[in-house]
Image (cartoon, helix red, strand yellow):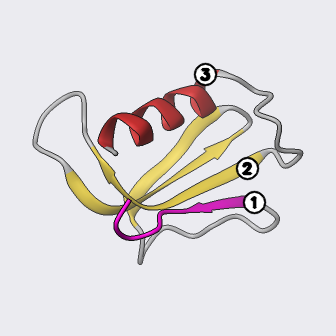
Amino acid sequence: MVRYVTALITALACTSTVGISQSSVAIRNVTVIPMTAGGPTANQSVVIRDGRIAEIGPSAQVRVPDGASVIERVRGE
């Protein structure tokens, strides 16, 4: 699962055309693995705007932009 989410975030961040018409995508309730320090952080949201990661933080605190496509993690996957 971690590999899938990491690959999904990387793919969305590296391309401006992901087959979704909106310019913003929010991936909610996932585990984020920082590349600089610390360990995995659960229940995070990642907001991608115009093909770039714009915000990462706790799902309860990150606001999903109006009109954004939302990818919601299903528990157990």
From the image, tell me which residue sits under label 3. 14
- Drawn side of residue 42 relative to residue 72, left or right: left
Percent of width and height locating residue 48 = 62, 44
User: Mark 3: which amino acid?
Assistant: Cys
**Extreme residue in the front direction:** 76
The N terminus, quarter of image: top left
Residue 16 image-quadrant placement = top right
- The magenta span reads 69-77
Which quarter of the rendering shows the C terminus? bottom left
**Furthest residue toward bottom:** 60
> Looking at the rendered structure, which numbered label has been put on residue 24?
2
Q: Position of residue 57 (x, y in %)?
A: 38, 59
The reply, left or right, for residue 42 in relation to residue 24 is left
Q: How many residues crowd around disc 2 within 10 Å: few (fewer than 14), some, or many (20 or more)?
A: many
Q: Residue 65: within the magenta?
A: no
Residue sitting at x 25%, y 61%:
42
Label 1 crowd (10 A; few <14 / some 14-19 / many >=20): some
Find the distance from the CA under tag 2 to the CA under tag 3: 13 Å
- 70 to 20, vertically: above or below: below
Of mark 2 and mark 3, the one earlier in the sequence is 3
Q: Specify whether 53 is left or right of 25.
A: left
The residue shown at (80%, 44%) is 23
User: Residue 45 or 30: which is nearer the viewer?
Assistant: 30
Q: Is residue 25 above or below residue 61?
A: above
Q: Are marks 2 and 1 in contact (CB under 8 Å)?
A: yes
Which of disc 1 and disc 3 is earlier in sequence? Answer: 3
Residue 68, label in figure: 1
- Tell me which numbered mark, 2 or 1, is placed earlier along the sequence: 2
Q: What is the x, y in percent for residue 74?
A: 46, 68
* Residue 25 location (% of width, % of height): 68, 51
Give the residue type at disc 2. Ser
Return the residue nearer the eye: 37 or 70.
70
